[in-house]
Image: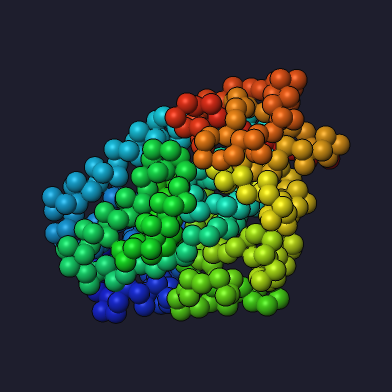
Amino acid sequence: MKKLFLLIPVALIMLVSCGSGNKTKPGDDVNDTVKNENKIVIDYPKDSVYDQLASLLAGDDASHFNDTFGDSQFWKEYKISIDTPWQRIQETRLDHIFNWSDSVVKPLINDTVILFYPFSGPDFLHAYQLFPNANEYVFIAMEKLGTIPALHQSSSEQLKAYLDATNFALRDIYKRSYFITGNMEQDLRKQQVDGVLPIILVFLHKTGHEIYDFGYYRLNNDGKTFTEIQKPTNTLDQVECIRFKILRQGDDKLKDFTYFYADISDSGFTKAKVLKTYLDNLRGCNTFIKSASYLSHYGTFSNIRDLVLLKSDAVLEDDTGVPYRYFTHDTWTPHLFGVYVKPIADFPSSYLYQKDLASAYDSIGARPLPFSLGYHWRTGEQNWLLFVRKK
């Protein structure tokens, strides 16, 4: 499979829209169905194209692209531009988050249920660090799905531009731990990177996942089933998503990962009733909300707020998520971490500052938080809240 891109004569855009045509059959290539030293055999055809694309975009392996690109000076510099900031956030942030979740969060919840992540953007990275054992991931955000161009047909200059644009779109994650909406809008409107797909591919590869299936889908009118589509319209006229089947290194079960491009404001749900139906039928889940611009504090996002409170077995969020006052003590057990201070200057603290949450930090007390994740990245004065539904 090493020269897959050279052997396939059609454009990669066609490969994007017809993923099943690019899968090997079980047994055709032992490297596609046998997992590392554990020799875990998955009886499912692997999507080698997208798995290798993820490796390329993550700066890991270019050997499947052609025989010389992996030795080029640009590729060496690109690897460094990815690996250096990644190693830094791995040591200063990601390892701390993973260990904190394992020792503090996991004992308090069932961490194997669906992870629901509204206002997510393409942030699989932190969702995985906090909920690595979730059996399924469901994301919803307003960043477009995007496509991957025919990179194997691109000139060296075009390829370099695309890889650089992908890496540039990650700059806020490296520096701040969240995507800035304005930057994402600009980054994902460019010709090189037109949506979240390449960023998600990087995150999947960097977190040790292989891609066994990929496709674009439209949610049907019943709000339960999906129809595969050739490519996304990248409009909100229909509820569209990208869906993966992924395998974490060392696991023996595939997981589903769905990213919806959708408006989850109250008016958005009114226009896309099928999405509301889908979410109403969602199994019990854990919900994660981070750096969400305080949207669920407003009356215009009451539906998604109510849905989180109804469906969640546990909610892990910072103060930008569902306001503290909605988690009544007869239903939820609160666990507070870090420190609570006023919202950063970008947001109106006179309205969004939660006096009841500040009082809870004083009366209940808060446990230390060994990492910075959220808007207060400059000062490290972060708060994290875990609400566990009482039996």
Q: Is residue 206 left or right of residue 164?
A: right
Q: Please state which of residues 188 and 32 is positioned toward the viewer in this rendering.
A: 188
Reply above or below: 46 against 181. below
Total numbered labels placed on residues in the image: 0
Picture coordinates of residue 300, whole percent (x, y): 69, 56
Where's the N terminus, which quadrant? bottom left
76 lies left or right of 263? left
Residue 118, position as x, y percentages in the image: 61, 53
Judged from this view, the residue extending furthest toward the right is 330
- Residue 390 seen: no
Residue 15 lies in what quarter of the image?
A: bottom left
Write the residue at 68% across / 46% down. 297
Q: Could you say where residue 205 lies in the image, as x and y percent from the top left?
A: 40, 51
Q: Position of residue 196 (x, y in %)?
A: 44, 59
Could you tell me which quadrant the C terminus lies in? top right
Please say which color scheme the image uses. Answer: rainbow
Q: Residue placed at 39% from the left, 68% from the top?
A: 147
Q: Quadrant of residue 362?
A: top right
Residue 302 can be seen in this image? yes
The residue that appears at 42% across and 66% down in the rendered structure is 146
| Residue shown at 40% from the left, 43% from the top | 172
Q: Nearer the viewer, residue 9 or 320?
A: 320
Q: Is residue 227 above or below residue 213?
A: below
